Structures are given as C-alpha cells and as structure tokens.
Image (spheres, rainbow, N blue to C red):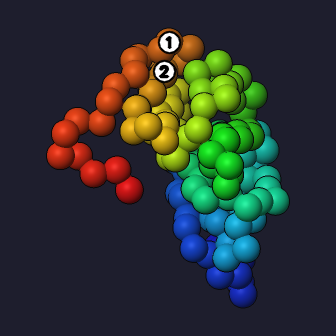
C-alpha cells in the first residue's frame, strides 16, 4: 500500500511488484518488493522516475539519470549509453531501457546491446 499522508506528483509502477513516486518536494519514495534495492528512497529533486522489474531509474533536475537496484541491468549499461548526456525521459523494463535526450533523440538498449538511436518521428509529441 502507498504510504499514508504523502502527496505525490508522479508515480511509476514496476513489473517487479514495486512502486516509486516523486513527492511534491522532488524526493523519491518507493514501496513494495525491495529484494535488489529497487525500492530504496532517494533524495531529489527529481523530475521523472521509471520502475522496472528489479531496478529503478530517475531523472534529476539537471537532466542526469540515476539508477539503483539490480546491479547488472540496466544500471551499468545506462552509464555506457547515456553518460554525460542531458536526458528528459527514461523508461526501463526487465532487460531493456530507452531514454529521450533533450534534443529529442531516442536511445534504446537491450541487455548490453545498443538497439539504436533515433530521432522522434515527425508528428509524435514528446511530453
């Protein structure tokens, strides 16, 4: 159950039975399965969070990505693919991840394999 008395501005439900939300002050509060540290809370300010299976990634106010949880994926691979780039959005799954850079380029990778960088197609709106 979500923690009582906390107001969130954003939540993400992971397929590994955990949920993370960004509180009004920008900190991240998670609950549920924490078998790999994926539900650890983080001090922000953060602007976006994505809960995967055994990992969680978030974007801070500076556009940097921070991940925690299962050490193999996507954390180490995230650093290889998006290190020092400005990120506006992240989405992670079990063994795959995608980010949208501030220049609207999409970068995705799967289990150590880069599956390409793409410009957002014309007409597709990026929130």
Determine which of the numbered discs, if any, sits on residue 29 in the image. none
User: Residue 63 or 96: which is nearer the viewer?
Assistant: 63
Q: Classify mark 2: residues with Cα within 10 Å, few (<14), some (14-19) or many (20+).
A: some
- Report whether 101 appears left or right of 104: right
Quarter of the image where one finds residue 43? bottom right
Give above or below for 116 relative to 101.
above
Mark 2 element type: strand
Q: Is residue 35 visible?
A: no
Q: Classify mark 1: residues with Cα within 10 Å, few (<14), some (14-19) or many (20+).
A: few
Q: Residue at 19% across / 39% down in the picture?
A: 122
Q: Residue at 49% across / 37% down in the picture?
A: 101
The residue labelled by disc 2 is 110
Determine which of the numbered discs, if any, sits on residue 113 in the image. 1
x and y percent of residue 94 in the render? 53, 33
Mark 1 element type: strand
Instruction: Tell me if label 1 and label 2 are in contact, CB under 8 Å.
Output: yes
Give above or below for 32 relative to 57.
below
x and y percent of residue 29 in the render? 73, 64
x and y percent of residue 121 in the render? 23, 36
Find the residue positioned furthest to the left: 123
Find the residue positioned furthest to the top: 113
Find the residue positioned furthest to the front: 103
User: Residue 58 or 95: which is nearer the viewer?
Assistant: 58
- Report whether 8 appears left or right of 118: right
Q: Residue at 40% across / 32% down in the picture?
A: 105
Find the residue positioned furthest to the bottom: 5
x and y percent of residue 14 in the render? 55, 51
Real-space CA distance between mark 1 and mark 2, rounded to the nearest whole angstrom? 5 Å
Quarter of the image where one finds residue 2? bottom right
User: Residue 121 or 21: which is nearer the viewer?
Assistant: 121
Give above or below for 83 relative to 67.
above
């Amino acid at each position: 159950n979500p923690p009582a008395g906390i107001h969130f501005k954003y939540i993400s439900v992971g397929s590994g039975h955990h949920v993370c939300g960004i509180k009004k002050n920008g900190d991240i509060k998670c609950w549920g399965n924490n078998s790999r540290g994926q539900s650890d809370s983080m001090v922000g300010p953060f602007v976006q969070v994505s809960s995967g299976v055994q990992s969680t990634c978030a974007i801070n106010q500076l556009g940097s990505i921070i991940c925690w949880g299962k050490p193999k994926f996507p954390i180490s691979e995230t650093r290889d693919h998006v290190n020092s780039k400005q990120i506006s959005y992240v989405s992670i799954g079990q063994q795959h991840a995608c980010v949208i850079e501030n220049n609207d380029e999409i970068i995705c990778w799967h289990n150590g394999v880069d599956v390409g960088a793409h410009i957002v197609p014309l007409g597709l709106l990026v929130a």
